[in-house]
Image (spheres, grey):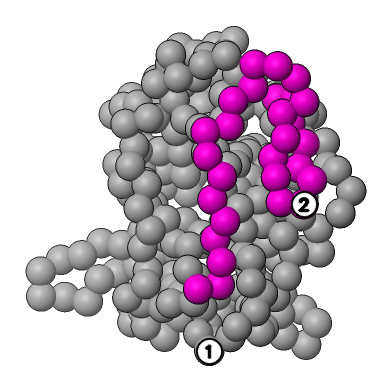
Amino acid sequence: MAMIDLKKYSGLALAFDGSKLLPQENGIEIGSRDVVNIGDVRPQLLNPELTCPTVFYYIFSNIDRKSLLKRKRLRFDMYVIPPNLAGIEYVKTLGTSAGKYPLLLEVVHGYLTLLLQTSNEEPGSIPQVKTTTIRLKKGEKLVIPPNHDFVFVNSRQTLSVVAIMYSSKCRMKNIFDDTRGAASYVIRKNARLETVLNPSFRNVSIVKPWKPESIYKDFNLTAKTPIFKQILRKYQRFKWLHDNSKIEWTNLPGCY
């Protein structure tokens, strides 16, 4: 594939060549590269018997420039999801939890279908799961609230590149192997995109999605400036990435 320039929306001189993230100037650091294959994702697929596509996505972790983010105790990762189908299901990432830490997300290239869910478990009762599906395009930003689990889905015919900024204190973990995926699957049926529920979840409520711009003012986000640049210029505005008590989450749209 042709080299894709990611500088405009990432805020860093980076390009993607089909399998590698390439710095385009001195001083840019990429900590690690992970390739997630179908064998890794199979336990969370609608059809776990599938054998292709082989590669589902790439994760480039600890991206930085001259250790500027490291000094602020922040991490910056990119997920690169090629366009493809696994049977009738669009390619996706493994279900992930950041626990009590929020994440700041930005679509750097292409489009993203974001599955978000949270659950309320009470002793002796079936967990109540709330889920929503949010569609984002290049340049749009979103905050994933604390205690919300997520899956990234590429439901379009172009490469999807998603950047996330989060506290270095956060420890991401993969989830949903025991339920064969999240509460929803994103599929292609009769040449149309559909979201269908996962029967492993018995008590699910679908929440109306919210638009990115509805939260920009609450987090002092500038719509047209990459989050990497915003954090370097106005770091004091982003202390909530380290401490979620700095935000009244229940008053914000989408924090259910």
Task: Indicate left or right for 228 with 245 as reference.
Answer: right
Which residue type does callout 2 highlight?
Answer: Gly
**96 vs 186, nearest the viewer:** 96
- Secondary structure of the residue carrying tag 2 is loop
Residue 218 shows up from this direction: no
User: Whole-percent x and y of residue 75?
Assistant: 47, 30
Res. 196 image quadrant: bottom right
Residue in the image at 44% along x and 62% along y: 95
The disc, 1 or 2, on the residue closer to the chain's N-terminal end is 2
Q: Kindly identify which residue carries mark 1.
A: 49
Residue in the image at 57% along x and 56% along y: 35
Q: Kindly identify which residue carries mark 2.
A: 18
Q: In which quarter of the image is the N terminus?
A: bottom right
Which residue type does callout 1 highlight?
Answer: Glu
User: Whole-percent x and y of residue 83?
Assistant: 74, 64
- Determine whether 81 is above or below 196 in the image: above
**206 vs 191, nearest the viewer:** 191
